[in-house]
């Protein structure tokens, strides 16, 4: 695989099952990625170093998944000018609402794009990263267009199937 263009990072290895969905989406578009674990609270120096070094490693977009207080995406965004996409992880009794609010409520000047809670959000984070990269990569843009067409065709097929079952 070529040099990673996207970095998927999570606050704990317990987030891996959800964050694999971002990886699957990126693989579907042929986009190289790396994965790592770092914590905004337990390893703040490591997190800052990770964020500061991402662009030097060739990374162009960062996807950060975190649960609970979910400060990882914001701390990373504070240390880089790369686009950061935050994925709220449902890791507490609040089922990810706490994470969603923590990620989405960034102060002016430190943007973090925020997606849905859990696996759907992780999938969308991978697709959003592809869309960002697709702005300057025609092959990725073509694959995104094919993806949208496949989604639309799936709806058409489901509509025909439903109508057919109602008419019998």
Image: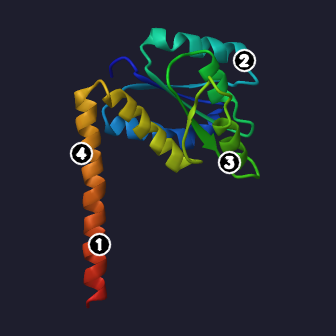
User: Which badge, 3 or 2, comes first in the chain's sequence?
Assistant: 2
- Give the class, few, some or many, for how many residues have Cα within 10 Å of label 4's Cα (few <14, many ≥20): few
- Location of residue 93 in the rendering, given as x and y in whole percent from the top left corner: 76, 52
Image disc number at residue 96: 3
The residue lying furthest to the bottom in this view is 168
Q: CA distance from mark 1 to mark 2?
A: 50 Å
Image disc number at residue 87: none
Query: Circle 4 sits in a helix, a strand or a loop, which is it?
Result: helix
Residue 68 shown left or right of residue 57 in the figure: right
Is residue 92 among what the camera can see? yes
Which residue appears at 31% of the width and 87% of the height? 166
- Contact flag, marks 4 and 2 (Cβ < 8 Å): no
> Which quadrant holds the N terminus?
top left
* Pair 1/2: label in front: 1
- What color scheme is it? rainbow
- Location of residue 129 in the rendering, given as x and y in whole percent from the top left corner: 42, 32
- Give the class, few, some or many, for how many residues have Cα within 10 Å of label 3's Cα (few <14, many ≥20): many
- Location of residue 82 in the rendering, given as x and y in whole percent from the top left corner: 50, 20
* Pair 4/2: label in front: 4
- Residue under pointer 2: 44
Picture layout, residue 165 above or below residue 101: below
> Which quadrant holds the C terminus?
bottom left
- Contact flag, marks 1 and 4 (Cβ < 8 Å): no
Q: CA distance from mark 1 to mark 4?
A: 20 Å
- Give the class, few, some or many, for how many residues have Cα within 10 Å of label 2's Cα (few <14, many ≥20): some
User: Which badge, 1 or 2, comes first in the chain's sequence?
Assistant: 2
Query: Circle 1 sits in a helix, a strand or a loop, which is it?
Result: helix
- Contact flag, marks 1 and 2 (Cβ < 8 Å): no
- Residue under pointer 4: 146
- Residue under pointer 1: 159
Which residue appears at 25% of the width and 51% of the height? 149
């Amino acid at each position: 695989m070529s040099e990673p263009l996207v970095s998927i990072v999570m606050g704990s290895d317990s987030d891996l099952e959800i964050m694999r969905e971002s990886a699957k989406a990126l693989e579907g578009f042929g986009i190289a990625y790396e994965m790592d674990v770092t914590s905004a609270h337990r390893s703040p120096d490591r997190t800052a170093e990770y964020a500061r070094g991402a662009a030097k490693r060739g990374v162009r977009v960062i996807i950060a998944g975190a649960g609970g207080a979910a400060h990882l995406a914001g701390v990373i965004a504070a240390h880089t000018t790369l686009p950061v996409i935050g994925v709220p992880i449902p890791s507490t009794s609040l089922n990810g609402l706490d994470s969603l609010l923590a990620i989405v409520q960034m102060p002016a000047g430190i943007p973090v794009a925020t997606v849905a809670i859990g696996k759907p959000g992780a999938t969308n984070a991978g697709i959003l990263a592809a869309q960002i990269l697709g702005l300057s990569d025609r092959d990725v843009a073509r694959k995104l267009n094919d993806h949208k067409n496949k989604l639309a065709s799936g709806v058409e097929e489901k509509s025909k199937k439903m109508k057919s079952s109602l008419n019998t």
